[in-house]
Image (cartoon, helix red, strand yellow):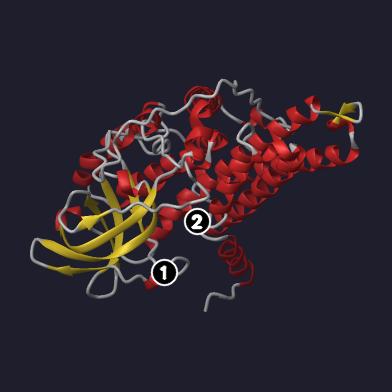
Amino acid sequence: MGNFPNGVSTPVDFHRSAKTDQFQHHDYYVLDELLSEEHLLARASVRDWVKQSVSPIIEDAANRSLCPTHLFKELGDIGAYGPSIPAKYGGGGMDDIAYGIIMQELERGDSGIRSMASVQGSLVMYPIYRYASEEQKMKWLPKLGTGEFIGCFGLTEPDHGSNPSGMLTNIKDDGDAYILNGSKMWITNSPVADLAVVWAKDEEGKIRGMVVETGTKGFSTPEIHGKWSLRASITGELVFEDVRVPKENVFPEIKGLKGPLSCLTKARYGIAWGAIGAALDCYDSALRYSQERIQFGKPIGGFQLTQKKLAEMITEITKAQLLTWRLGTLMNNGKATPAQVSMAKRNNVHMALEIAREARQIHGGMGITNEYPCMRHMMNLETVLTYEGTHDIHLLITGMDVTGLNAFK
């Protein structure tokens, strides 16, 4: 388990809800026929884990704004870290559709739980696997894969979010090490991380990637408080004050924005699948509630306006499922473009947020309570709409891709 250097390692006794997770999968176009046995087994395994380990405590964790840090190790046990990274390096050795399905099931439980896993796998393990030396890979990846080490990813800065090229965090050569100065903001997992994959500019202005281990002198990871969203996920800063980073911790070849952006593409792909999980959970709860809640002498699901809401929900979910399955096929064949991933991330997160809002309406006043998941998903998705590229930024990525004209400058 992580060292939890900032004193947040005290075990928390979360209240376990007596309610049973009744979720049933919804597959209107029978897309399961397109999935392999491995895909279906992975989904069943992670779904069972979510029902047993996440659903009973997630409302209490979100209500108290506490991260269930004991789940970090369990996520490693179920293979949620780097499912598509080769097993030699601590991953699952599966394909990208399996990775997406696992993210979907985790986010069905909670976006924060999926964030814990996708940051570890896509933003920490993936760049180490893709850009590190063999020695660096074997040093960090196996322990990250099991959850013995927890990682975080430092790109966003207080004044540079959508424009990462403007970063101020920098490194200067100092013999056998670099001296790192600067700060990063909105970093998932940072207060409990053992290491951070950090991107900084060298003295030539080139962006370099490196691993910085927590506990290094001058490196601190203060927690961010007061969030109304992703309350069960722990978020913080990365602050570097003359931190000595050994040169053997720097990725040897990769320079420029290509490195961090490739990691974001991998993470955004997982989010495109994950958002469907949140939408499915809201739809499933709304459908069941509409069949049980009696008004004017019959279930509210028998009224036209409720049926309109439910019909539109399952239509949008089905469209998103088709989009991600095709994108997953392209990813498996090495043909998916970053712009295609942007389209799926933007569409599916927006879809899920709208479904969360409509599902909350079907639940009426009960929809604002933690007896039902809709309000929690809605608050979480407001963040998912923004992180890993905002809704508007992804729209402009698609616009640039179809017109060939850059609207960012």
Residue 325 in sight = no
- Whether the residues at callouts 2 and 1 have beta carbons within 8 Å, the answer is no
Q: The residue under label 1 is which amino acid type? A: His
Q: Which residue is mark 2?
A: 387
The kind of residue tagged 2 is: Tyr
Describe the element under mark 1 as helix, strand or loop.
Answer: loop
Q: Dot 1 surroundings within 10 Å: few (below 14), some, or many (20 or more)?
A: some
As drawn, the label of residue 160 is 1
For the point 58% across and 46% down, which residue is it? 327
Nearest the camera: 60 or 40?
Answer: 60
Residue 357 on image: x %, y %: 70, 46
User: What is the crowding at mark 2: few (fewer than 14 residues within 10 Å), some, or many (at least 20)?
Assistant: some
Left or right relative to 319: residue 308: right
Depicted 385 relative to depicted 6: above or below? below
260 or 386, nearer to the observer: 386
Q: Which mark is residue 328?
A: none
Q: Residue furthest bottom?
A: 409
Secondary-structure class at tag 2:
loop
Q: CA distance from mark 2 to mark 1?
A: 13 Å
Residue at image position (42%, 59%) is: 261
Q: Nearer the viewer, residue 160 or 302?
A: 302
Residue 399 drawn above or below residue 231: below
Query: Considering depth in this image, is 97 or 368 the residue closer to the camera?
Result: 368
Residue 294: horizontal and vertical position, in percent? 84, 27
Which residue appears farthest toward the left when viewing the image?
175
Residue for point 46% across, 49% down: 266
